[in-house]
Structure formats: structure tokens, C-alpha cells
Amino acid sequence: MITNLFLSLAFWSTTVCAQSKFPEMNGISYEMYKDFTQDWNLVTVRYRKDSGEMRFTYANREAFSALKNESSDYPNGAIFGKVSFVTGEDPSYLSSVMPMAPSRVQLMVRDKIKYKNSNGWGYALFTPDGKLMPGDIKEKTESCVACHSIVEESGHVFSKPIGFIKTSKFNALESLKTKKVYFTTSKVSDLPRNIQKLLPSADKNINDLQGVLKKHFFYGTFDEIRPTLIKESLRTRKPSILIGDDKKSFSLVFINKSGHCSKGETEIMSFHTGPKPKRKVIEIKVCVGDK
Ligand code: HEC
């Protein structure tokens, strides 16, 4: 008995010591929730047409029941986990696209007191093996908070359970009316020189995304926002940009009129900056359906 107690104490203390070795963001480590894809409810699957990335979002019991009741007041202990995968064709059945390698893991942990400065959610972002992604933690956190504030009326949670979308009282378009994210028109000639150089000379005006994301961003924001920019460019046939308040970080898209996509598709050129301090410009070309 005594030996047992001693053993379990020893075990406990090594576990505690070991835990503190895991990388943490806002007091959250990936290790704490590493089995979430098996233990929690699958909420939804999202697919990004521009990057071919598939995301699976899971909710623990507390989060899932609030979600199903369409409560925007998530209780303490509610947690969402999201894992993103790059996709590829199934070698044994080529028209079937499947998740291949995981690319990152994101967590949102509800604690209204501990995380009162980030609207009651603790945000964390990891590589698939639980390491921290590059970048300043404060900056990363502020960008999570800023973008998730677009859906403030649904408790800062974007996902809707599969099947609940049509009946949901939270309408994504409603959030646009709150002017958290909106476009104005700016002159290309007012942009920093290095950005002007990337654009075709025929374009004089550009859709300029305004709102919360301009102030609080990290390099992930500029990749995340690409589909929104593409949509606006397809709608207006003009280039679109999100440029940070620092005037150095940006995501830019425009239609490449001499592109080589198949009929019914448009070639989009996109440039966005990577992690600081280098802010290397990443170029991506995608064919997107016109509809
Ligand atoms: C530019 C916008 C944007 C930023 C920045 C952002 N998110 Fe999200 N997040 C989304 C969207 C949109 C969804 C749902 C759709 C999807 O997954 O594509 C989402 C979903 C999630 C989910 C699943 C729960 C939910 O709200 O649906 C988690 C967890 C999450 N994000 C964590 C984070 C973390 C952690 C950060 C910061 C490191 C972050 N997010 C930054 C836009 C953003």
C-alpha cells in the first residue's frame, strides 16, 4: 500500500515535470488534448478551394452541446480542436481527394476568467507534432481574437455542426453588417512601391480590406484571408488586398488575364507575406471556378 502510494506519487510528479516540457501557447499544450480527434465529436469539415486544404473541427462534450443548442454563451471547459490537412488524390482511385499529411492543429479553450482579455477563449496553434509555429505569441493570439470577433454573436465560434447550417439562427452574412470586415476602394498608386510592382499596370484601383484584421494579424492571417480576397476580385474584376497597418505585411490577389486555366475557370495570382522578420513573399497561382 505504502509502496503503491509512493509509486503513484513518483509517477504523478514525473508526469507534472514532463508536462511542463511541452511547448505551450497561452497555457495550452497540444499534449493535453492530443487525442481529441478520437475522443470528441466531429463538428464539421471545411475545404479550401484555393489551397486544397481540408480542416476537421471537433468539439468536446461541453462545446458540442452549446453548439447544438445554438448558445453563444459557451461554459468554462468547452474546447474546440481543429486539425488541417493538405490533400492529395487517392493513388488507388484518382478522382477521390483525401487528407494526406496534417499541417497544423488549433485549439480554443473556454475559461471566462483566465482568458478574459481574449473574449473568454484561450487560443493555441501548433505544428502536427505539438511544437509552436513560428511567430510572436502575443501577435498570434491577437490575430486569432481579431478574426474570431467577426462571429462575436455566435460566441466567437465559426463552425456549425453538419446538418445544422440551414436551420441556424446565426447568419454569417449578418456578421458582415457589423462592419468587422469590409472593402473600400483605394488607388494602386497609394500602395507601397514593392506591392505596386507585383500588379499588372492596367489596374488603377484596388479593393482594400478594412476592419479588425488590419490591426491584429500574423502571417497565417494573410493566407487565411485569400479566399475572401479572391471572391471580391471575381465579383468586381479588380485586384484585392489586405495590407497590415505596418504597411509591410500583406495578401494580394488579382486575376491573371493571360492565365492558362480551363474553360469556366479564372487564373488568380496571389502574393502574401510569410513570418517575420523576413516576411518572404509567397507566390501562389490557382484556377478557380467563376461561379
Ligand atoms: C483570418 C481569420 C482567422 C484567423 C486569423 C484565425 N481563425 Fe480560427 N477560424 C477561422 C474560420 C473562418 C474558421 C472556421 C472555418 C474554417 O475552419 O475554415 C475557424 C475555426 C477555428 C476553430 C474551430 C472552432 C470555430 O470557431 O469554428 C479553432 C479551434 C480555431 N479557428 C482556432 C484559431 C486559432 C488558435 C487562431 C490563431 C492562431 C485562429 N483560429 C486564427 C478564421 C480565423
Image (cartoon, grey):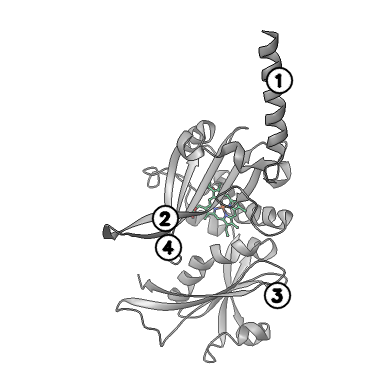
* 148 and 29: which is toward the camera: 29
Residue at image coords 41%, 59%: 87
Identify residue type, mark 3: Lys
Q: Secondary structure at mark 4?
A: loop
Earlier along the polypeptide chain: callout 2 or callout 4?
A: 4
Query: In what quadrant of the picture does the C terminus appear?
Result: bottom left
Determine which residue is flagged by label 3: 247
Earlier along the polypeptide chain: callout 4 or callout 1?
A: 1
Report, in whole angstroms, how far the alpha carbon at label 1 lies from the one at label 2: 41 Å
Q: Look at the numbered disc 1 and say if its residue's Cβ is closer than 8 Å to ligand 1.
A: no
Determine which residue is flagged by label 1: 9
Q: Secondary structure at mark 2?
A: strand
- For the question of whether residue 175 can be seen, the reply is yes
Q: Secondary structure at mark 1?
A: helix
Is 259 drawn above or below residue 216 in the view shown?
A: below
Earlier along the polypeptide chain: callout 3 or callout 1?
A: 1
Q: Secondary structure at mark 3?
A: loop
Q: Look at the numbered disc 4 and say if its residue's Cβ is closer than 8 Å to ligand 1.
A: no
Discs 4/1, front? 1
**Spot occupied by residue 144 in the image (x, y as percentages of width and height):** 63, 53
* 237 and 124: which is toward the camera: 124
Earlier along the polypeptide chain: callout 3 or callout 4?
A: 4
Report, in whole angstroms, how far the alpha carbon at label 4 lies from the one at label 1: 48 Å
CB contact under 8 Å: marks 3 and 4? no
Report, in whole angstroms, how far the alpha carbon at label 3 lies from the one at label 4: 28 Å
CB contact under 8 Å: marks 3 and 1? no
Residue at image coords 55%, 50%: 128
**Spot occupied by residue 286 in the image (x, y as percentages of width and height):** 43, 74
Determine which residue is flagged by label 2: 100
Determine which residue is flagged by label 4: 52
Graded by Cα atoms within 10 Å as few (under 14), some (14 to 19) or many (20 or more), the crowding at tag 4 reads some
Graded by Cα atoms within 10 Å as few (under 14), some (14 to 19) or many (20 or more), the crowding at tag 2 reads some
